[in-house]
Image: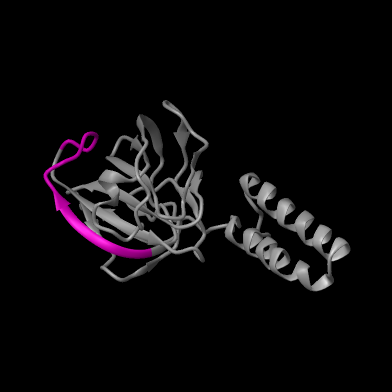
Amino acid sequence: MVRIPIVKEGYIFIFAAAFLAVLLGVAVNPYWAIVPGVLGCYFAYFFRNPQRCVPTDKSLVVSPADGTVMEITPLEGDDFVKEPCNKVVIFLSVFNVHVNRSPIEGEIKCQQYVCGRFKPAYKDSVGFENERHMIGIENEHLRVTVTQIAGILARRIVSWVTLDDVLKKGECYGLIRFGSCTEIVVPGNVEIAVNKGDKVVGGETIIGRIKD
């Protein structure tokens, strides 16, 4: 059986809900424990971190998040991928796994955190206005950027990495709490392998492949 761990940031929510359920159930009425009990179960579900089968082919770029592809947009370049590129935007609902994973193996060469507003994560402008955290990852074949963007419910972006850290493909590097989106920017020599509306799985779904 596959073990489904829970990231450490979730335990405070789970324990707080469990404590409240016990307190209300004993001090007031057992029925009052239902709501916090259900919340505790949801928190355990939300902060899950399931194991993933990561493809080892170095030419493949995997999804950095679970969710739905909302946008695929060509760009002239960004601050890290300084060449024609493509941006893939993935929307994460409150029922998706919210742990973010590295789309390639490589070293973190750029990192930027920006405070911002909290618009719904499906709005077109959230990548510019909302709280976000970007990392640029580079290896001998390509460089990509991945940006965690907070949503209307997400009030905290969590990062477990810093500059010069080396990530394996599919390795967890952070999470966003309660509804969000993730953007990945890849250079033009990466052929996009997903379409708008596709469901993707972080660390497993192939977002693109390096062209021969």
Location of residue 28 with respect to 82 vertically, above or below: below
Q: Which x, y percent locates residue 125?
A: 24, 52
Q: Is residue 195 left or right of residue 161?
A: left
Residue placed at 24% from the left, 57% from the top? 124
Residue furthest out toward the front: 28
Residue placed at 38% from the left, 56% from the top? 63
Location of residue 34 with respect to 180 vertically, above or below: below
Residue furthest out toward the bottom: 31
Is residue 96 part of the magenta span, yes or no? no
Q: Which x, y percent locates residue 105?
A: 41, 41
**Residue 115 picture quarter:** top left
Q: Nearer the viewer, residue 155 or 96?
A: 155
Q: Nearer the viewer, residue 90 or 203?
A: 90
Picture quarter with the N terminus: bottom right
**Residue 17 picture quarter:** bottom right
Q: Is residue 106 left or right of residue 195?
A: right
Residue placed at 28% from the left, 39% from the top? 141
For the magenta stretch, what is the residue range? 68-82
Q: How many marks?
A: 0
Q: Which x, y percent locates residue 42?
A: 63, 64
Q: Is residue 119 left or right of residue 22?
A: left
Q: Which of 123 and 187 is in front in this view?
A: 123
